[in-house]
Image: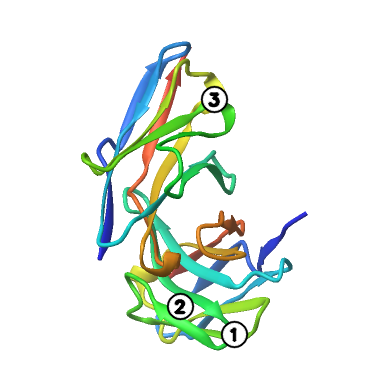
């Protein structure tokens, strides 16, 4: 069994300040982990993925995430928020045979000018 | 460019109707998925398929069935639509394990 918990349903930051979106997972297997972003009325886009290589993963648009096995966490960060980052973000875990993909409930990021 | 096409963007059906949602990908991908997206619940996996005629239940398969007769097409069937199946349905595909998902634009289904 596997599950993903996104600890905040909404996060609000000011433009130019750091972003932290939190994700905890559970998996009976060595997981692969992903972050996807969904802009309003747009399709989901892959930000980054972790597949047991380096624990610090860099993605597109300046985002990065760190895999911490001891904390079962995969938090998404960005040093400086931009207005265009306003969107919904989903943390995803892939467990058994890599086929079963489980999404978290999503975190809506709001960026204030 | 890669493409996952869902046949309808909006669909309105009545309770008890049989509903077919079609998804076609043109990338020769092995894996295909059906999710439903509801506010606050994220995306929940209904079914996935890792090969032609192969399917596995996801987290919420009740009330749904699927068909994959050809590699490029993965159909979701609501045998008898109910109001609690009103949702956004998203199809996705990917080449193989741990590869990124390619999503369709979604079908907003309303069951009245």
- Identify the residue position indicated by label 1 in the image: B52
Q: Above or below — where is A100 with respect to A13?
A: below
Q: Quadrant of the C terminus of chain B?
A: bottom left
- Identify the residue position indicated by label 2 in the image: B14
Disc tally is 3
Query: Which image quadrant is residue A107 in?
Result: top left
Does residue B112 show up? no
Q: Above or below — where is A52 with respect to A10?
A: below
Label 3 chain ID: A
Q: Which x, y percent locates residue B70?
A: 66, 85
Crowding around mark 2 (Cα neighbors within 10 Å: few <14, some 14 to 19, many 20+) is some
Does residue B102 show up? yes
Give B94 or A112, whichever is nearer the viewer.
B94
Dot placed on the residue nearer the N-terminal end, 1 or 2: 2
How far apart marks 3 and 1 lie (CA) works out to: 38 Å
- Asked if the residues shown at circle 2 and circle 3 are in contact, with their CB atoms under 8 angstroms apart, the answer is no
Q: Which x, y percent locates residue A104?
A: 34, 50
- Identify the residue position indicated by label 3 in the image: A62
Q: Above or below — where is B95 with respect to A19?
A: below
Residue A8's tag is none
Q: Which x, y percent locates residue B34?
A: 49, 69
Residue depicted at 25% across the width and 66% down the height: A1
Answer with left or right where residue B109 lies relative to residue A104: right
In the picture as drawn, the residue positioned furthest to the front comes out as: A53
């Amino acid at each position: 069994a596997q599950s993903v918990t996104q600890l905040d349903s909404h996060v609000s930051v000011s433009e130019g300040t750091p972003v932290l979106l939190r994700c905890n997972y559970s998996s009976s297997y060595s997981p692969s982990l992903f972050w996807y972003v969904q802009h309003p009325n747009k399709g989901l886009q892959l930000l980054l993925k972790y597949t047991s290589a380096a624990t610090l993963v860099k993605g597109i648009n300046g985002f990065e995430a760190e895999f911490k096995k001891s904390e079962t966490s995969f938090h998404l960060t960005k040093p400086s928020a931009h207005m265009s980052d306003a969107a919904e973000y989903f943390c995803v875990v892939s467990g058994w045979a890599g086929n079963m993909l489980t999404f978290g409930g999503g975190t809506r990021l709001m960026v204030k000018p | 460019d890669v493409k996952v096409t869902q046949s309808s963007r909006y669909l309105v059906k009545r309770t008890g109707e049989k509903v077919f949602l079609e998804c076609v990908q043109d990338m020769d991908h092995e894996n295909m998925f059906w999710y439903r997206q509801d506010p606050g619940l994220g995306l929940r996996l209904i079914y996935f398929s890792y090969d032609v005629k192969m399917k596995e239940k996801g987290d919420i398969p009740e009330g749904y069935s699927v068909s994959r007769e050809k590699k490029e097409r993965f159909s979701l069937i609501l045998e008898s639509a109910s109001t609690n199946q009103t949702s956004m349905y998203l199809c996705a595909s990917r080449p193989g394990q741990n590869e990124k998902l390619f999503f369709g634009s979604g079908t907003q289904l309303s069951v009245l």
